[in-house]
Amino acid sequence: MTSPRRLKIGLIGLGRLGSIRARIIAHHQPRMEFVAACDTKPGADQWAAANLPSSVKFFADPVDMMANGGIEAVLISTATATHAPLILQALDLGLHVMCEKPISVDVLTTEEVLAKAASKPSQVFLVPFTKRYDESYVATKKMLLDGTLGDVHAIETHNSDQQEPNGFFVAFSAQSGGIFVDVGIHDIDIARYFLEPEKSGKKQVNRVFAVGQQAVYGALAKTGDADNGWGLVEFANGKVLQMHVGRTLTNGYESATRVYGTKALSAINGNSTINRVEIRDAHGVRTQTTPDAFTLYDATFYKDLGEFAGAVLDGTPLTCTLNDAYEAAKIVVALQHSFRTGLPVYFDDDGRPIMEGVTSVSKTNGANGHANGTTNGHTNSVAE
Ligand SMILES: NC(=O)c1ccc[n+]([C@@H]2O[C@H](COP(=O)([O-])OP(=O)(O)OC[C@H]3O[C@@H](n4cnc5c(N)ncnc54)[C@H](O)[C@@H]3O)[C@@H](O)[C@H]2O)c1
């Protein structure tokens, strides 16, 4: 039974992603009523006045909006390092929460947030992974489920942004947790979607190994980050992910996935073309590349916002579980650690990455103010 009511939502963060979310909520997603918006940066009030419907109330303080904005749900689209404190406050205020990935840049903070969410079972909490709402990935999952692919045993992903001449990625790195955490979490999630490691129990991963380089943005070395990274993940069920994440393409954004089954191979988005046009000229045969990932969000954001509203209003299920966010977080933290130390990271029988030898954790790479440290001798943060 579909409720005729619309979900009263407030949006925190009106940046690159938040502005797209705002447009979709305001003009396209019929199951939501856009009640309030917030951003702390100077001039955000003017942006909101010029771009949002006049019925949306602007707040400069997120807690004020969550407490007094007349909303029942909040969408958090701020910098990653601010997610956890905002989620905790939202849950304490009784709100349903949708938050961009990842929950945090470290495992301990992620666990703190998940524990709070578990204590509020009547509140919906969604961390959407965009590719699960992309029709090509959904079609491949259907082929897996109906047996067309046979036994899916390996995944290869290539996920690269276009070079950004102003060095946006360098400033962004300090807040994002690093390329494996920020970009690679999509590759990890999609590998988990197809390789189904949760079926082998608590320990989902045997080991990971990562290498990386600063091919264009040398300053990334200062934050222990890379502009190209390669990761290898061996899951506990013996299945394998090989991934490449990058920020240095010159043609546009590319995100391709090859799903290897014993009966068939699904190659998703092998050519990240913007449309079906081929240009035939003195250069040969060319297509135009999708310029950036943001171009793809109109379709996927419409779906994940609708799913979130449906979960609150009708009690319908979510595609992405909090456990998906947790498992992916552990793996990307391990990959970033492996890149920084040059060593493989093994996982213990409880499914936690074993990252010995690191005893203190600074907050310079975007840890969000929580006292990160070690648990059972294992350091869990990427912000070393
Ligand atoms: N495909 C995806 O799922 C995907 C893609 C890109 C980014 N993201 C995630 O979305 C989030 C936002 O990314 P972005 O590129 O839009 O960042 P951004 O820096 O462009 O925008 C963030 C906005 O949040 C505001 N902000 C920061 N802290 C705030 C606070 N405490 N209260 C209110 N406003 C605050 C900033 O002023 C800024 O306008 C990140 O966590 C990122 O990882 C997800």
Image (tube, rainbow, N blue to C red):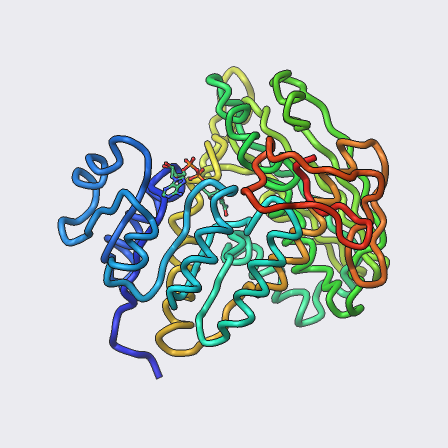
Q: Is residue 47 left or right of residue 371?
A: left
Name of the residue lying farthest toward the bottom: 1
Q: How many marks on residues?
A: 0
Instruction: Pick the residue in front: 7 or 72.
Output: 72
Q: Is residue 349 left or right of residue 93?
A: right
Please determine whether, in this image, residue 355 is positioned above or below residue 166: below
Where is residue 242? Give x, y as percent.
76, 43
Location of residue 151 (image quadrant): bottom right
For the C terminus, which image quadrant?
top right
Residue at 45% of width from left, 76% of height from top?
122
Where is residue 289? Give x, y as percent.
50, 32
Residue at 42% of width from left, 78% of height from top?
315
For the N terminus, which image quadrant?
bottom left
Where is residue 142? Give x, y as percent.
61, 67
Name of the residue lying farthest toward the left: 54
Please determine whether, in this image, residue 257 is positioned above or below residue 306: above
Instruction: Pick the residue in front: 70 or 377.
Output: 377
Residue at 50% of width from left, 75% of height from top?
121
Where is residue 45? Give x, y as percent.
22, 38
Instruction: Pick the residue in front: 63 or 43.
Output: 63
Residue at 17% of width from left, 40% of height from top?
49
In which of the image's four quarters is ligand 1 placed? top left
